[in-house]
Amino acid sequence: MTTKVYINDLAIFLPNEPVSNDDMEKVLGLVGGVPSRSRKLVLRNNGIKTRYYAIDPRTGKYTHNNAHMTAEAVRALCRTSGTELEDIECICCGTSSPDQLKPAHGQMVHGELRCPPCEVITTAGVCGSGMTAMKYAYMNVALGLTRNAVATGSEFSSSFMRGYNFEPEIMARIENLEKHPALAFEKDFLRWMLSDGSGAALLSKTPNSGAPSLRIDWIENVSYAGDMPVCMYSGAVKQEDGYLQGWREAGDPLDIIKWNYLAVKQDARLLDEHIMNVSVDRALAHCVKKHKLKMDDVTWFLPHYSSEYFRSRIYNAMEKKGFAVPYERWFTNLTAKGNVGSASIYIIMEELLHSGRLKSGDRLLCYIPESARFAICYMMLTVV
């Protein structure tokens, strides 16, 4: 027997002041001493105007790491919800950019918070990791294992994107007598897409009495990796035959640095070719069938897409399936807050929840695609 579960509050943390398009390269640094050739094209397509980095623009030093940012979001959540840190019974942390391989990110966040012993879990992945954390928190409360849980999504993407990270690769290309050494598009592309921040949600079995809560009706996390190729990756290089060679398989440890195994890479061609089919034709169709979902059931559509380029493509794909939620019922803040990966859906929900625009009975359909090896999440919420 399960119980109903509610998101009673959300809070976010975005480090430092927003960074404009013109200032991005000043903060992240040049690669090979020259401006990026793809930056303007990528920014024109993604539509992002400002984003946040955990970097002091004056000194170039980091102001926070991932665990710090996640803990800040949880502290903000406790302040706004009136919850004491010592009352949290379960902490579920999702990220694609932990500060270290071990210990787990969740334990590092717990250590930053210095709260009493409790259950802690870390979920890995990319954008979907924030939602697998959410689902674990949801199931824990629904099954009565804990009275409450905090779920988080967070990213420290700037740590992968600094110009100096790519210098050894550029030097290696020069040594290989390449006439015009430049950073491959699959790596440079993401430098202008991703940014830093965190979000946290408080889940419990009891809704708020004087403020809106979001009842979780269902969460569907579906992986299509069984028949889909790797599209976004880090800690590896992709061979010509498609094999993903992990950094520990490098023949020479120096190759890990020389060929930048640790850079985040995106196969933009694969993304463009497959993401709509997987997201809408397969994943949305699965949710429609399983939950008897209708377009008219959706008051608000909260899509986490990485680029404004995909906005019309999502709409057109949904329209072909008879599920074209009108644009006036969409809510996203990509252009102002940036693409913060696993934290983005928390950042979107937090703004809408506190906007005063929600009414009791409104239903929110959240869409969180993950291109790494094509996993898609949809979540349905009801305002109570």
Image: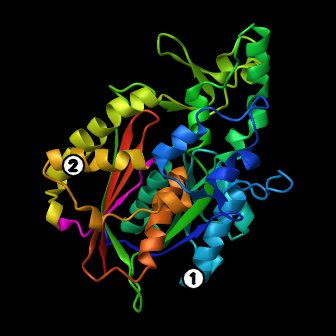
Mark 1 crowd level (few <14, some 14–19, many ≥20, 10 Å Cα): few
x 28%, y 67%: residue:
328
Q: Which residues are magenta?
A: 297-307
Where in the figure is residue 314, as x and y percent of width and height? 29, 47
Say what secondary structure mark 2 lies in. Answer: helix
Q: Residue at x 55, y 64 (%)?
A: 199
User: What residue would you read off at disc 2?
Assistant: 318
- The amino acid type found where label 1 is placed reads Thr
Q: Nearer the viewer, residue 335 or 279?
A: 335
* The disc label shown at residue 80, or none: 1
Residue located at (70% from left, 65% from top): 17
Q: Between residues 39 and 110, which one lies in front from this camera angle?
A: 39
* Coloring applied to the structure: rainbow
80 or 197, nearer to the observer: 197
302 sits to left or right of 66? left
Q: Where does the image place residue 327, in percent across and percent down from the top left? A: 28, 62
The correct choice, above or below, for 14 with respect to 253 in the image is below
Mark 1 or 2 closer to N-term? 1
What's under tag 2, amino acid-wise?
A: Met
Residue found at the far bottom of this picture:
210
Residue 98 is at least partly visible in this image: no
User: Magenta stretch containing residue 298, yes or no?
Assistant: yes
> Label 1, label 2: how many angstroms apart (C-alpha)?
36 Å
Can residue 144 be seen here? The reply is yes
Please tell me how crowded label 2 is: few (under 14), some (14-19), or many (20+) other residues with Cα within 10 Å. many
Asked if the residues shown at circle 1 and circle 2 are in contact, with their CB atoms under 8 angstroms apart, the answer is: no
Left-right relation of 242 to 176: left
Taking depth in this image into account, of 219 and 237 the one nearest to the observer is 237
Residue at point 41% right, 57% down? 135
Left or right: 247 as drawn, with respect to 297: right
